[in-house]
Image: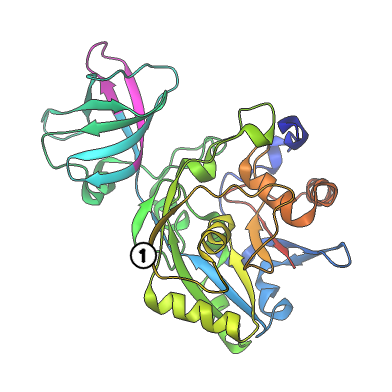
C-alpha cells in the first residue's frame, strides 16, 4: 500500500497540547469490529464496557528525561540529543539533529554545572541519525538525565516540557526506566479507574517494552511495505508470563493497552503460550496480519504516515480505519499523545 494512503488530515486545533485536567477525563471512541459500530463514550466508562472476560496488558516502561541540550565542539553550534538507550555508564545510543552532521570522532559538549566540562565523542555512526556515544566519565545514568535532561515531548506538542509533564507524561504504574517516549495509551489510567476495574473483575498483567524508534519513527518510504521497524527490547517476568498463560487457559480476551503492549505479546506468543525473559522485537503489523494472542486493543489516536496508524488499520480494516478517523475529526476528538483514546473490540 502507498504510504500516502495514511496521510490523513488532522486540524491543528485538535492536536492536544496539554493532557486532560484529570487522567480519566478523556473521551473514548469505541469501535465494535463485528457490527462496525462506533460509539462516543468517556474513558471513565471503560469498566462499564469491558468485564471479567477481558484481561488487560500494560506496558510499565518509564520515560527517561532523554532530551539533552548540547554543543558541537568543532563549530560551537547548539543542538540536541535524544537518548534512546543507556548501554552502560560510559555508552549511550542517541538520535542526533537532522540539521547537523555528527561524524565518528565528533566531540559533543554535554550539560553540566559550575562550568564543568563534560565531553562525549561519537564512537560509532549506527546510521545517518543514530549514534553510539562514549564518555570517559560515567555520566550516562538515569540520575544524570533526570538532572540535566528534559521529558521528550513529541514535536507536535509545541510547548517546552515542564515539571507537570514529568508527572503527566508517565503512566502511574511505570517502573523500569528505558523509554524515549511514553506508552501513551496508559496515560489515561488513574488509581480510581484501577479500583473500578478490579470491582468489575478485570485482571491485568504488566510487560515492559522500552519505547524507541521502532514505535515513533514515521514512515518515509513510498510504500508501507518498504518501511523497516527498528529493534526494541522487551521483558516479561516469570510472574507476569504465568498470569498471561493463566488468562489464555481460562479463555480470557487479551486486551493490550497501547500498541507497544500489543507488539510485545504478539512477538512473544508461540505455540499457545508466553515465555518469560529478555527479548527484542522488530514486529511490524500491517494489513493482512492475523492476531495470535490479542483479541482487542485500547490505544490513542496516532499520527499520519506512522507504523502505529498502519497497525490500527490492520486490526480494523483500512476502510474502517479511515471511517473511524474521519468520525474522530468530525466529532472533534483530541489527537495524539495527550489526546483522547479509542477502544477496539
As displayed, is residue 80 above or below residue 317? above
Residue 271 is situated, as x and y percent measured from the top left of the image, at: 56, 70
> Up-down: is 227 above or below 249?
above
Asked if residue 80 lies in the magenta stretch, the reply is yes
Question: What's the colour scheme?
Answer: rainbow
One can see residue 11 in this view: yes
Asked if residue 21 can be seen in this view, the reply is: no
Q: Which residue is mark 1?
A: 175
Name the foreground residue: 157 vs 89.
Answer: 89
Q: Residue at x 68, y 26 (%)?
A: 222
Instruction: Provide the major secondary structure of the magenta segment.
Output: strand
Front residue of 32 and 286: 286
| Quarter assignment of residue 67 | top left
Q: Residue at x 43, y 62 (%)?
A: 208
Please report the bounds of the magenta region as a residue range: 70-84
Is disc 1 surrounded by few (<14), some (14 to 19) or many (20+) residues within 10 Å?
some
x%, y% of residue 83? Answer: 34, 39
Q: Position of residue 78 (x, y in %)?
A: 32, 20
Amino acid at each position: 500500500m502507498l504510504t500516502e494512503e495514511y496521510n490523513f488530515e488532522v486540524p491543528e486545533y485538535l492536536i492536544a497540547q496539554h493532557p486532560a485536567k484529570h487522567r480519566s477525563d478523556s473521551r473514548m471512541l469505541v469501535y465494535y469490529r463485528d457490527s462496525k459500530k462506533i460509539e462516543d463514550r468517556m474513558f471513565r466508562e471503560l469498566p462499564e464496557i469491558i468485564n471479567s472476560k477481558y484481561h488487560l496488558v500494560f506496558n510499565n516502561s518509564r520515560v527517561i528525561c532523554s532530551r539533552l541540550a548540547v554543543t558541537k565542539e568543532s563549530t560551537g553550534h547548539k543542538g540536541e540529543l535524544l537518548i534512546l538507550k543507556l548501554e552502560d555508564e560510559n555508552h549511550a545510543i542517541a538520535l542526533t539533529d537532522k540539521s547537523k552532521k555528527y561524524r565518528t570522532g565528533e566531540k559533543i559538549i554535554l550539560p553540566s554545572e559550575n562550568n564543568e566540562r563534560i565531553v562525549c565523542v561519537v564512537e560509532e555512526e549506527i546510521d545517518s541519525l543514530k549514534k553510539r556515544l562514549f564518555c570517559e566519565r560515567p555520566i550516562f545514568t538515569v540520575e544524570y538525565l533526570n538532572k540535566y535532561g528534559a521529558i521528550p515531548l513529541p514535536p507536535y506538542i509545541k510547548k517546552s516540557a515542564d515539571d507537570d509533564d514529568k508527572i503527566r507524561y508517565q503512566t502511574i504504574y511505570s517502573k523500569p526506566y528505558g523509554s524515549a517516549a511514553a506508552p501513551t495509551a496508559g496515560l489515561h489510567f488513574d488509581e480510581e479507574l484501577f479500583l473500578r476495574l478490579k470491582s468489575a473483575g478485570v485482571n491485568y498483567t504488566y510487560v515492559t517494552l522500552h519505547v524507541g524508534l521502532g514505535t515513533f519513527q514515521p514512515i518515509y518510504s513510498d510504500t508501507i511495505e518498504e518501511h523497516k521497524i527498528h529493534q526494541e527490547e522487551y521483558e516479561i517476568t516469570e510472574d507476569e508470563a504465568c498470569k498471561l498463560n493463566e488468562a489464555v487457559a481460562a479463555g480470557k480476551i487479551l486486551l493490550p493497552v497501547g500498541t507497544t503492549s500489543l507488539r510485545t505479546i504478539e512477538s512473544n506468543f508461540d505455540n499457545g503460550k508466553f515465555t518469560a525473559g529478555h527479548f527484542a522485537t522488530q514486529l511490524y503489523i500491517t494489513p493482512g496480519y492475523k492476531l495470535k494472542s490479542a483479541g482487542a486493543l485500547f490505544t490513542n489516536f496516532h499520527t499520519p504516515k506512522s507504523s502505529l496508524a498502519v497497525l490500527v488499520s490492520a486490526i480494523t480494516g483500512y476502510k474502517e480505519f479511515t471511517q473511524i478517523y474521519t468520525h474522530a475529526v468530525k466529532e472533534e476528538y483530541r489527537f495524539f499523545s495527550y489526546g483522547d483514546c479509542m477502544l477496539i473490540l
